[in-house]
Image: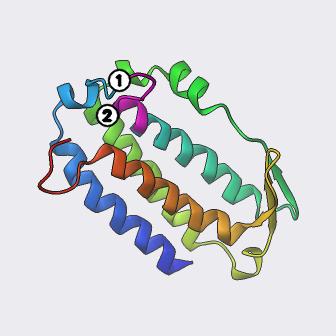
């Protein structure tokens, strides 16, 4: 899982430079009805890092692991990410993902097959969950960061 952890670190490092360059006004800009602002998307990724980190650790000590789902819209609203400083959110997200990568890298290989169930979803393995974390992060980074050379 060291390779996955390194891939996560590279993804975060590359995105961090672009996120830091976004002005506060762009982070606050409405994206359309029912869509989160960039601050809220990044806040969701902060929540995701915290929630997934806990699950990754708990899966080391339980097999199977039953992990509750969460109400992402309610979490984002409750955390009031729209009112946070963009720069603070970026640095928090970067730091948390460094810790998530550290946790992934230190996961014993024999724990990767641990069965993990999330809410009412079908069981997966801890390894699948860790790989899905990076996929999920990339999905939201594509929303946060416009493609190079295109307007947002």
Q: From the viewer's perspective, is residue 34 above or below residue 59?
A: above
Residue drawn at the location 72% of the way across and 75% of the way down: 112
The 10 Å Cα crowd at callout 2, few under 14, some 14 to 19, many 20 or more, is few
Q: Position of residue 83 (x, y in %)?
A: 36, 18
| Residue 7, image quadrant | bottom left
Quarter of the figure with the C terminus: top left
Real-space Cα separation, disc 1 to disc 2, in angstroms = 7 Å
Mark 2 highlights which residue? Answer: 88
- SS for dot 2: helix
Image position of 61 with respect to 121: above or below: below
| Nearer the observer, 12 or 54 | 12
Binning the other alpha carbons within 10 Å of mark 1 as few (below 14), some (14 to 19) or many (20 upward) gives: some
Q: Is residue 55 left or right of residue 21?
A: right
The location of residue 120, given as percent across then percent down, is 82, 46
Residue at left offset 39%, top offset 41%: 92
Quarter occupied by residue 21: top left
Is residue 131 found inside the magenta-colored segment of the image?
A: no
> Residue at the left extreme?
149
Q: Is residue 28 toward the left or the right of residue 104 in the image? A: left
Split into 4 quadrants, where in the image is the N terminus? bottom right
Is label 1 in contact with label 2 (beta carbons under 8 Å)? yes
Q: How is the image coloured?
A: rainbow
- Report the front residue among 65 and 77: 77
x 66%, y 63%: residue: 129
Residue at horizontal 51 percent and vertical 55 percent from the top: 136
- Bounds of the magenta span? 33-41
Residue pointed to by mark 1? 84
In percent of width and height, residue 64 lies at 88, 62
Judged left or right of residue 145, residue 60 is: right
Residue 84, picture quadrant: top left
Q: Position of residue 104 (x, y in %)?
A: 57, 67
């Amino acid at each position: 899982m060291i390779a996955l952890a390194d891939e996560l670190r590279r993804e975060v490092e590359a995105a961090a430079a672009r996120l830091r360059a976004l002005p506060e006004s762009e982070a606050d800009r409405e994206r359309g009805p029912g869509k989160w602002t960039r601050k809220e998307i990044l806040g969701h990724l902060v929540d995701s890092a915290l929630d997934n980190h806990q699950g990754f650790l708990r899966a080391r000590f339980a097999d199977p692991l039953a992990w509750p789902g969460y109400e992402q819209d309610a979490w984002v609203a409750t955390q009031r990410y729209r009112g946070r400083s963009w720069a603070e959110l970026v640095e928090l997200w970067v730091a948390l993902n460094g810790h998530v990568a550290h946790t992934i890298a230190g996961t014993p290989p024999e724990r990767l097959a641990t069965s993990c169930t999330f809410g009412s979803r079908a069981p997966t393995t801890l390894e699948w969950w860790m790989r899905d974390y990076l996929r999920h992060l990339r999905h939201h980074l594509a929303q946060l960061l416009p493609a190079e050379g295109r307007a947002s």
